[in-house]
Each structure stands twice: as C-alpha cells, then as structure tokens.
C-alpha cells in the first residue's frame, strides 16, 4: 500500500537545519597528565571544540601503540565524506604549517640520505606533503605536485572572527587527546567545550548554546494568521514568554528584569547567533526557537503513529508547508514513492523549491519541486537563474586558474557572495565565490556529480 500524505498546520514563521568517520586507531594508556576526557571524539558535535590530526600523522610507539606527535585544537564545523572540517585561530594555523614543514624536512632528509640531489628531492617531497605557508593573512596550500593540476593552489582567508577553515580535501580526523604527545591550542575546561550549536529545524542557524529552549506553546487562529504565546526556559526553568498577536506584528519576548534570562541576556544571545555566518535579528531568533519546539512536537506525534514529516522549503531555506507521510518509509523505494506523490501535485506555495523528509535525527533532501528547465546565462551574473534543489553543470574559474573548470552539483543557495553546492557522493558541500561562475546549465536529476575537471 503506498504511503499517504496528510497536510499539517502551517509553520508559525518562515524562518531561515552522527557522521561516523573512520575508526580511531588503538589508544595508548593514559598517563599522569590532565584528564581531557571531555574532548573525546565520540562526543564531539558541530560547534564543539575538539583535537584534530591528519590520518597520516599516526606513528608506531615502542610499546606497539599508535601515537600522534601533535594534535590541533579547533572547532568542528562539519564533516565531508566522513572527514572532519574545522576552524582554528592563527596560532594553531601556524602550528599546522610548522608540523607540515617538519614532515617535509624529515622526508627530504630521508631521500637525501638515499643519494638524491636537492633538485631530485623537491618533487617527491611536494607530492607527499604539500607546501603550505602564510601570504599575509592568507594560508596558501600548493597541491600542484600532489594532484597533477597546474592550477591547484588554494588560498584560505580568515573569517570575520580571524579563524581559518581547515579541510582542503585532506583526511583530517577528530582524535583522542590521550593519543597525542603534544597539543597545539588552548583546551577549554570541562563544561565549556561547545562554542555554538546548530538548531535542528532551522537550516544554517547557529546559536551560542542549547540552554535556552521553548517548553510550551499555545496557538489561536486569527483572520490574519496564527497568534501564539510560548514559554521560554533557561536550563529547563521558566524565564519569560514569547508572544505574537497574529496580526502581522512582531514576535516579542517578555521577561522580568529579575529573570534568569531577561532582555539583556536575550540581546547577548542574539548577538552571538549567526545565520549563514551573518548576524540575525531578535525576532528571527525568537521565531526559530518557537519553531524548534513546534516542529519537534509534530515529529513526536507523527512518530508515535508510525509516520514521519515532509516539509517544503523555499530558496532561502524557509519552511512553507509541512505534511505527514504515513507510514514512514523504510526503503529507498518507499522514499521515492513519497517523492513522486509530492511532485505529482502542485506545491501549495509557488515559492517552494525542495522537499525534505525527517529521517529520525535530521532533515534529509527528498526531491525538488518540478520547474521548467532553466539556464543561467545572465551576462553579468550567471547565478541569477539558479534554482535551489536543481542539479546544474557549472563552468567556473578562480582568480588563480588558467583554465576553466567544470562540475555537476546541486544548488543549495547563497551565503552572501558565496554560492553553495552539494557534490555528494563525489564530495560534500562546495563553496564557490559568485564571481568565479561563468555559466550554469540545468541537467537531469540523475546526472552523475563531479567537480573540478578541466574544460576546454
């Protein structure tokens, strides 16, 4: 029997949502050093501080255990193909470059001892350990010898907070600090590991911590929309009320000055929050917190009946529609059947671009909303016609590349002047500066993905 789709009530607001990496090698017994168990990689989540190292860094100790000469303290921002991507401050970035140079020097010395001349040593060293250095404030990674690509020189600029994203397509892993002989970077004390958290139901929104939550919600339909009041709590204790009159007015927080979370605390909380890396408004945050509770409650109700939820997003990631899929799909074929039902009927909101399905712990892409094939060919901005959720053949060139590159990826949206694309399973999320894009042609959804191929 095919699954059925039931309409849920409209979302309250249109708000801007465990990857298992490779297994760790055997850990050496703990010594008499400080207890760093709060940084164990098994408990690390996005926004948390961890210790990272490349899979090439492990060495065999005299007792048969595997050790890491140096681990690097950073904040996990995501995983791509099971490998860690993290940010570090300038001091840790310097330590990463120094360690890479240590490996290069050791390899060069070994090859020289085998009789190779300095000119003969350079290429195999570059192929094994890519040169990395600072050029002003930018990290330069030269992978030309390793990749055989004459344009594979990458620049990593600091973000507004002065942090560098470390990934570069390399096999970085979150590691146990107990496996490291030395750790570069400042280790947070227990209880202060999480620098920020990502909200589950609001894509790309990060908040400073998960201590603030909505614990109750009451709604009343009005002729202009839905009025609501929501109870806001700090660490599970009531702190104030979020209200919206349902007549087009703002969403507002009311907390007493004596509250554990008053308007000053809310201001600080909002200032520390980011959507796609950009500051957000107080109302945006309040609506997102209400949505977290409301969506969570709907998911719980659906799960109790053996169902799950699907939701329609616009190009900015705003939730436009929610429906119940009953029963929850257990196989790819059942997911495909739900996708066919959704695309066979007109979307309730013409701004809808893609459907997602709740997969138990996170929202996953289900299908795109059918639209007429388009080609982004605007002379000044080839990205002007891109549609979120659609697959494109892209032609682009960076400022350091001499030849055009091609890729087939799914458009995820824009983060300022950066275009976001999904290249799975070939790679993870790709960040492409808008100025690099030369052309984009819509292609069928089953076109195999690839990226960074030279096109002539």
Image: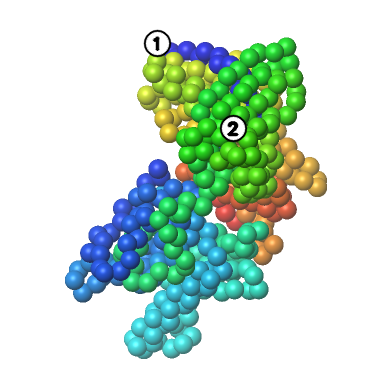
Occupied quadrant, residue 262: top right
Question: Is 224 displayed left or right of 179 in the figure?
Answer: right
Closer to the camera in the image, 58 or 92? 92
Compare marks 2 and 1 and give the one earlier in the sequence: 1
Circle 1 crowding by C-alpha within 10 Å: few under 14, some 14–19, many from 20: few
Closer to the camera in the image, 400 or 311? 311
The reply to whether residue 124 is in sight is no
Question: Mark 2 = which residue?
Answer: 240
Q: Quadrant of the N terminus?
A: top left
Closer to the camera in the image, 266 or 32? 266
Position in image of residue 24 (x %, y %): 31, 56
Position in image of residue 104 (x %, y %): 44, 78
* On screen, residue 87 above or below 270: below
Q: Quadrant of the C terminus?
A: bottom right
Position in image of residue 170 (x %, y %): 46, 60
Question: Mark 1 = which residue?
Answer: 1
């Amino acid at each position: 029997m095919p699954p059925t789709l039931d309409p849920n009530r409209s979302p309250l607001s249109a708000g801007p949502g465990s990857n298992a990496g490779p297994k760790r090698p055997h850990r050496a017994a703990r010594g008499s050093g400080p207890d760093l168990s709060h940084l164990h990689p098994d408990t690390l989540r996005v926004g948390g501080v961890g210790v990272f190292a490349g899979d090439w860094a492990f060495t065999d100790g005299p007792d048969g255990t595997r050790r890491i000469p140096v681990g690097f303290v950073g904040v996990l921002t995501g995983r791509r193909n099971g490998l860690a991507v993290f940010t570090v401050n300038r001091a840790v970035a310097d330590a990463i470059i120094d360690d890479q140079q240590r490996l290069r020097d050791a390899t060069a010395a070994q090859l020289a001892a085998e009789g190779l001349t300095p000119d003969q040593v350079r290429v195999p060293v570059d192929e094994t350990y890519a040169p990395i250095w600072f050029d002003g404030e930018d990290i330069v990674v030269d992978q030309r010898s390793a990749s055989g690509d004459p344009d594979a020189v990458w620049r990593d600029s600091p973000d507004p907070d002065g942090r560098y994203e470390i990934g570069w397509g390399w096999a970085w892993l979150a590691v146990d600090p107990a496996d490291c002989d030395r750790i570069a970077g400042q280790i947070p004390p227990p209880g202060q590991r999480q620098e920020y958290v990502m909200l589950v139901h609001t894509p790309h929104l990060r908040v400073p911590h998960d201590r603030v939550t909505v614990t109750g919600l009451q709604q009343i339909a009005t002729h202009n929309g839905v009025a609501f009041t929501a109870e806001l709590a700090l660490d599970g204790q009531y702190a104030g009320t979020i209200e919206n009159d349902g007549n087009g007015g703002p969403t507002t927080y009311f907390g007493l000055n004596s509250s554990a979370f008053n308007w000053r605390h809310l201001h600080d909380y909002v200032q520390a929050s980011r959507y796609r890396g950009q500051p957000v408004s107080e109302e945006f945050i309040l609506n997102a917190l209400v949505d977290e509770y409301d969506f969570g409650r709907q998911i719980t109700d659906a799960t109790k009946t053996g169902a799950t939820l699907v939701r329609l997003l616009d190009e900015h990631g705003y939730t436009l529609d929610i429906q119940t899929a009953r029963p929850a799909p257990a196989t790819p074929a059942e997911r495909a059947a739900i996708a066919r039902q959704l695309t066979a009927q007109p979307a309730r909101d013409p701004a809808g671009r893609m459907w997602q399905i709740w997969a138990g712990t996170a929202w996953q892409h289900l299908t795109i909303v059918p639209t007429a094939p388009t080609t982004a060919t605007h002379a000044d901005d080839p990205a002007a016609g891109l549609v979120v959720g659609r697959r494109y053949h892209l032609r682009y060139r960076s400022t350091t590349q001499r030849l055009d590159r091609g890729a087939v990826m799914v458009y995820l949206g824009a983060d300022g002047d950066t275009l976001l694309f999904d290249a799975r399973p070939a790679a993870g999320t790709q960040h492409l500066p808008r100025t690099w894009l030369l052309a984009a042609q819509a292609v069928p959804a089953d076109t195999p993905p690839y990226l960074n191929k030279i096109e002539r």
